[in-house]
Amino acid sequence: MKSSTANQSRVAVQADADRLADFVLFTQRSCILNLSNELNRGNISFPQFFLLAYLSSEDYLTMSDIAKKMGHSTAAATGLVDRLEKLGYVERVHAAEDRRKIMVRITHKGTELVAHMRKEIAANLADMMSEMDEEEAETLDHARRAVTPR
């Protein structure tokens, strides 16, 4: 009996995961299209935007931190930062304890861009969620509870 219950639970979890995967794929496509249009106006690439999003939640990141988070080499991270700095979205500052250490922090302009894009994404998701049926909404709520830190 336990084996049957465990198997049913795995099947239910897999069904929820499949529905959630469909939701992610659908919302990702929609969000990416909207994000792409917005970012094109500001001449920002997706990697540059993702870096800004990382920086918006930190006081600063070093070049090696950026490279690690982005999955790039330090040279590639430097290129991302160069472009964002020219556009006024980030700035480089020297560490007080070691002037050789360069830290990157987001500017007010960068913070505004991330906040605007987050607001656009949230509005897009709210539109999609308002059109969900009860089963889809339940699956999403189950997934939200599973990934929310306790």
Image (tube, rainbow, N blue to C red):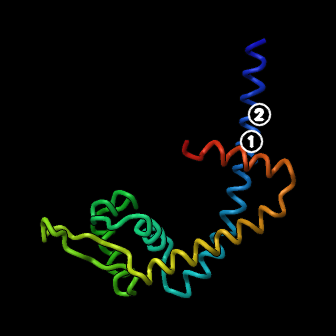
**70 and 127: which is toward the camera:** 127
Crowd band around label 2 with a 10 angstrom C-alpha radius: few (<14), some (14–19), many (20+): few
Q: Is residue 52 above or below residue 4?
A: below
| Quadrant including the C terminus | top right
The numbered mark at residue 93 is none
Mark 2 — residue?
A: 12
**127 and 23: which is toward the camera:** 127
| Quadrant including the N terminus | top right
Q: CA distance from mark 1 to mark 2?
A: 6 Å
* Horizontal arrangement in the rendering, residue 120 relative to residue 53 (left or right): right
Whether the residues at callouts 1 and 2 have beta carbons within 8 Å, the answer is yes
For the view shown, which residue lies furthest in the top direction?
Answer: 1
Crowd band around label 1 with a 10 angstrom C-alpha radius: few (<14), some (14–19), many (20+): some
Looking at the picture, how far across and down is residue 55, in whole percent?
Answer: 40, 68
Looking at the picture, how far across and down is residue 123, in whole percent?
Answer: 70, 72
Q: Residue at x 50, y 80 (%)?
A: 112
Using the rendered view, name the quadrant where residue 98 is placed: bottom left
- What secondary structure is marked by label 2? helix
Looking at the picture, how far across and down is residue 103, in whole percent?
Answer: 26, 69
